[in-house]
Amino acid sequence: MLMAPQSPAEATALVALMLLHDSRRDARVDAAGDLVVLEEQDRSRWNELQIAEALPLVDEAFRGEPGPFALQAAIAALHCRAARAEDTDWHQIVQLYNLLEQIQPSPVVSLNRAVAVAMADGSGAGLRLIDELAAAGDLDEYHLLHAARADLLRRVGSSSEAAKSYQRALALVTNESERRFLERRLRELEPKVN
């Protein structure tokens, strides 16, 4: 549930966040309507005008003590500032998630932080955090927990465990584009599992 901004700075941050997320809309799916994950998106399809409009708003929202929307907008801005996926400042994103986790703790924020840790410090580090979240049980019915776990397991070469996590994510997913993406990832593992 989206909470209403609690200050003018947070209202500004929310506008920036919406602009930044919308700026990537055209790159999120391919011509067939299949999901394209952030690291594989064609950044030339991102709306540079929206990004240019949003970035000063992010800076403005950070002039005071940043709230949850300002932190989320700053995370989105770091993605948009990176010319290539590998240029993303994942360590800074982890720091922003650390702050977000302090002021607006939730299992989903912790999951997003775990993924950022995986990108900054290696899949194993993120996987340990995701396994802690999975053990807590709060996100057991959340397909993205299982999808993220599957991806990290795939990256560390644990194909059979990754397949199990993809299957669990598939049992929970409701979005067709995401379903096709998960099915494709699972098919890619089949030669390694069998």
Image (spheres, helix red, strand yellow):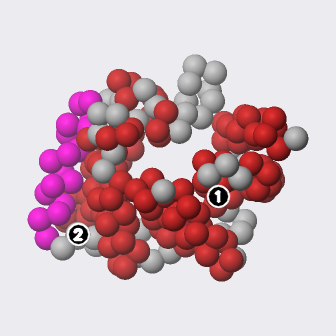
Between 174 and 160, the one nearer to me in the picture = 160
Where is residue 193, by image quadrant?
A: top right
Magenta span: predominant SS is helix
119 shown above or below 63:
above
177 lies left or right of 77: right
Q: Mark 1: which amino acid? A: Arg
Q: What is the distance, in whole Å, between disc 1 and disc 2 at their CAs? A: 30 Å
User: Alpha-carbon neighbours of circle 2 within 10 Å: few (<14), some, or many (≥20)?
Assistant: many
Where is residue 36, by image quadrant?
A: top right
**Which stretch appears magenta?**
48-64
Could you say which disc has been placed on residue 184 in the image? Answer: none
165 lies left or right of 136: right
Q: Residue at x 15, y 55 (%)?
A: 59
Where is residue 103, by image quadrant?
A: bottom left
**In x, y percent, where is residue 126?**
53, 63
Under tag 1, what secondary structure?
helix
Sequence-wise, the earlier of marks 1 and 2 is 2
**Mark whose residue sits in front, 1 or 2:** 1
57 lies left or right of 80: left
Could you say which disc has been placed on residue 149 in the image? Answer: 1
Q: Residue at x 63, y 30 (%)?
A: 34
The residue carrying mark 2 is 66
Q: Residue at x 38, y 25 (%)?
A: 45
Q: Mark 2: which amino acid? A: Pro
Mark 1 touching mark 2, by CB under 8 A?
no
139 lies left or right of 24: right
Between 128 and 116, the one nearer to me in the picture = 128
| 62 in the magenta segment | yes
Residue furthest to the right: 194
**In x, y percent, where is residue 87?**
32, 41
Under tag 2, what secondary structure?
loop
79 shown above or below 35:
below
